[in-house]
Image (cartoon, rainbow, N blue to C red):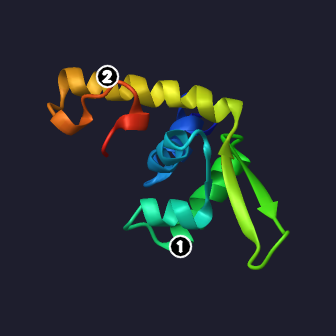
Amino acid sequence: MQQTCSVYRTIDFISKKWTLLILLELYKTQGTKRYSELKHSLLDITPKILSSRLRELEHEGLITKTIITDGFPIKCDYTLTESGKDFIRIIKDIKKWSLHWKQKNKKCMQQDCKHCEL
């Protein structure tokens, strides 16, 4: 029965390591970044995991992938969808809860995650 539960299915993909951080990185830059920029921003992520998470987020409709073929090498832009932008609100709510109940991180006191030093 858990597999048909909407909460279970949502938590199943958003709880994977790096997923929320990828969404936050896209949010910080007005919703669009190239693969190489994401890789550079998320220092410890492996290329295989980054590619896998990006595919999953695209499959779930939180991001879109745009392939740019007007030069070499071919580049890909990843952009938050409306669903992805709406999900940022949930991440902000998690942050508010964490700051209130769990964390006293001075670097993370900004309410807007665009300005947060993760």
Quadrant of the image containing the N terminus: top right
Q: Is residue 20 above or below residue 1?
A: below
Identify residue for label 1: 47
Q: Residues within 10 Å of mark 2 (few under 14, many from 20)?
A: some
Kind of residue at disc 2: Lys
Q: Is residue 22 above or below residue 9?
A: below
Q: Residues within 10 Å of mark 1 (few under 14, many from 20)?
A: few
Secondary structure beneath dot 2 equals: helix
Q: Which residue is at the front of the view, 30 or 5? A: 30
Kind of residue at disc 1: Pro
Work out which residue is located at the far bottom of the displayed protein and give it.
72
> Label 2 to label 1, Cα distance in Å?
31 Å
Q: What is the quadrant of residue 69 in the picture?
A: bottom right
Q: Which residue is at the front of the view, 22 or 101? A: 22
Q: Which residue is at the front of the view, 26 or 14? A: 26
Give the residue displayed 49% in from the left and 41% down from the top: 28
Q: Position of residue 90 (x, y in %)?
A: 48, 26
Q: Position of residue 81 (x, y in %)?
A: 70, 37
Identify residue for label 2: 96
Does the image show residue 6?
Answer: no
Q: Position of residue 115 (x, y in %)?
A: 37, 36
Give the residue displayed 44% in from the left and 48% down from the top: 21
Horizontal arrangement in the rendering, residue 35 relative to residue 60 (left or right): left
How many numbered marks have been drawn onto this rendered protein structure? 2
Horizontal arrangement in the rendering, residue 99 relative to residue 114 (left or right): left
Mark 2 and mark 1 lie on one chain; the one further toward the N terminus is 1
Secondary structure beneath dot 1 equals: helix
Q: Is residue 37 above or below residue 115?
A: below
Does the image show residue 71?
Answer: yes
Give the residue displayed 54% in from the left and 44% down from the top: 29
